[in-house]
Image: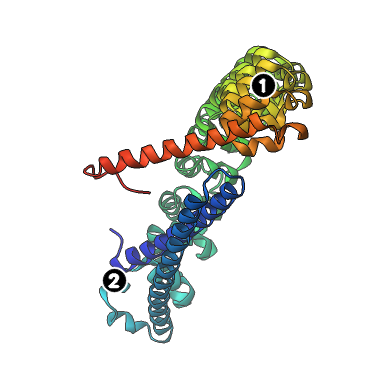
Amino acid sequence: LQPDHYAVATALKDSLTAVRCTMDLLESEREIVQLARERCWLVQEMAEELESRSRSMLTTVREDGILLRTVAEEMNSSRKAYRRAIIVNRSVIKQAELSLQCDQEVVFGWALDHVSTLRKCDRNFIKTVVEANGEALEQVPEEFRHDREIVLLAVQQSEGWALQFAAESLKCDREVVLAAVSRSGWALEHAAEELKGDHALVMTAVKADGESLEFAAPELKRDPEVVIAAIVRSGGMALQAAAEEMKNNRSIALAAVSACGLALEHVGASLKADRQIVLVAVQGNGLALEHAAPAMQSNREVVLAAVKSNPTALRFASAQMRANREVVRVAIAKDGYALMHASLDLQKDHETVLSAVQEGGSGVLEYAAPDLREDEGLVTAAEACIAKRHAAANIEESDCWQGSGDPDCVKL
């Protein structure tokens, strides 16, 4: 169990982080409301109400943040005073409150700096320190970095991180390295070169963290079993660390883009023109179209699949596809603002622009041809879109209040 004092300090840090995140979100909300107001997405009255609410909430959060910082500073000051007392007179620990006596950061983090040289050579003392904080291995005398038992304890306690501080001889010890990479695949970086070529050990590492494939020996980056395991664990992105022949292996490339469409960036050049591989990639993430071969960026089926997944993918389609009425229609049906990526001819097309403003509102008119921006029919359609959104928002709010007996229903 964590000491009470440490738990409170941790909670204060977490709370301060939450306050900062909340402030950032409120600032972002205020900017969004201002943008919506400028683009006429919100009526004046609603925009003013939202801005007022954001300002009020931001003020409250700032005040709470100041209070939390004050408490945290006071707690930190008490701990600093206690640490100074230990330096002056180690016997003061006997008078300290129980929570500080049990505070590992105070007792062990500072102990190595302030105990006598004789004490630093006490194996039992060092063992106690690394059992509490494995990363303290970095500060122990060199002889203990060669001590297999102590290094194993440090590696286990630190979830593999302490391997980097072990003596070179222990970075060659298979059991020690296996203990590290089974907890964190990234520890493979600090293993001896010969162990980076150990098939079973590397398999353990990539199953823990797929992208640790980066640190495997070259021959294992060419091993299909290792590469597939890394791809599965990393959600496809480990492909970037694989050998070139693996990036050009069709089945491996297909496995990678199936896990993450954006892995298409790392497949071999020839496979970026493979219709099936590209289609699977863009169906998973339309933005993968950016990494497809030009022939695929001109392929109607591929581009349609991409804009259905993410209408912004239209920007990566060929000029021919950006001028294709059906492709653009599918994109703007999901996001009217996709009109910005359509060809100039379609930005001049009244029917296309009408479909875009009916979905996206008046802000979309910015991307229409200049002579259409003041078109009465388009302006009316944009206003109708905004009115429809406001009505839907009011209905949703009304429904929420009608269901106010539900504890999950709150007014936003």
Would residue 48 appear left or right of 79 to someone viewing this image?
Answer: right
Query: Please, what is the three-letter code of the amino acid marked with disc 2?
Result: Ser
Image location of residue 99, percent across then percent down: 29, 71
Residue 231 visible in the picture: yes
Q: Earlier in the sequence, mark 2 or mark 1?
A: 2
Where 105 falls versus 384 (above or below)?
Answer: below
Q: Which residue is mark 2?
A: 99
Query: Mark 1: which secondary structure?
Result: helix
The residue at the point 46 percent across, 71 percent down is 112
Q: How is the image coloured?
A: rainbow
Q: Residues within 10 Å of mark 2 (few under 14, many from 20)?
A: some
Outermost residue on the front side: it is: 376
* Residue contact between numbered discs 2 and 1, judged by CB atoms under 8 Å: no
Q: Secondary structure at mark 2?
A: helix
x and y, in percent, of residue 58 in the image: 46, 62
Q: Quadrant of residue 246?
A: top right
* Type of the residue with mark 1: Glu
Query: Which label sits in the foreground, 2 or 1?
Result: 1
Q: Residue 351: which numbered mark, if any?
A: 1
Residue 272, quarter of picture: top right
Identify the residue at horizontal 52%, vertical 45% (top origin).
42
Q: CA distance from mark 2 to mark 1?
A: 72 Å
Front residue (pair 14, 192): 14
Q: Residue at x 31, y 60 (%)?
A: 2
Q: Quadrant of residue 224?
A: top right
Give the side of residue 374 with respect to residue 382, left or right. right
